[in-house]
Image (cartoon, rainbow, N blue to C red):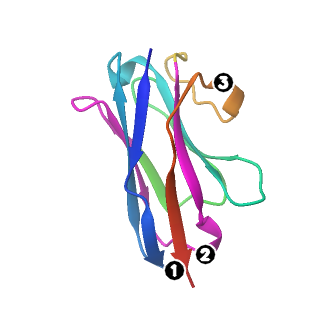
Amino acid sequence: QVHLVESGGGLVQAGGSLRLSCAASGPPYSGYSMGWFRQAPGKEREFVAAISKGGTNTHYAIFVEGRFTLAGDDASNTAYLQMNSLKPEDTAVYYCAATYGLYGATYTDSHHYDYWGQGTQVTVSS
């Protein structure tokens, strides 16, 4: 069983930065693939970024490429989503997720993930 806790959300002005954290309890971070999704009011949950088991590969949604960076710290079993150049349209609840995937594989479909955090609110003002 993997328990995920997100933190780091908040209110920021457009152009600003935030770093979200996803702390995992259970098997070591390198033991599973992780992803970040977001859901804005009235919209469906959408894929943001994913990192493979072992941290060798990452994949980003096109609308965050060049602005967001996903990395992991095996020592603390934590994944970090660094978000720069934030835009008002990035406002949403951000969720991290984990699954026992294949080494090197990243997953963009939420149905691949078995474990989810509670979400953290990110609000970007214009």
Q: Residue furthest left?
A: 75
Instruction: Tell me which numbered mark, 2 or 3, is placed earlier along the sequence.
Output: 2
Tell me the residue that label 1 is attached to.
14
Instruction: Tell me which numbered mark, 3 or 1, is placed earlier along the sequence.
Output: 1
At 59% from the left edge and 66% from the top edge, which residue is drawn?
91
6 relative to 13, above or below? above
Three-letter amino acid code at disc 3? Answer: His
Three-letter amino acid code at disc 1? Answer: Ala
Q: How many marks?
A: 3
The CA distance from mark 2 to mark 3 is 28 Å
Q: Which residues are magenta?
A: 71-99
Give the class, few, some or many, for how many residues have Cα within 10 Å of label 2's Cα (few <14, many ≥20).
Answer: some
119 relative to 116, above or below? below
Tell me the residue that label 2 is attached to.
88
Q: Which mark is residue 112?
A: 3
At 58% from the left edge and 74% from the top edge, which residue is drawn?
87
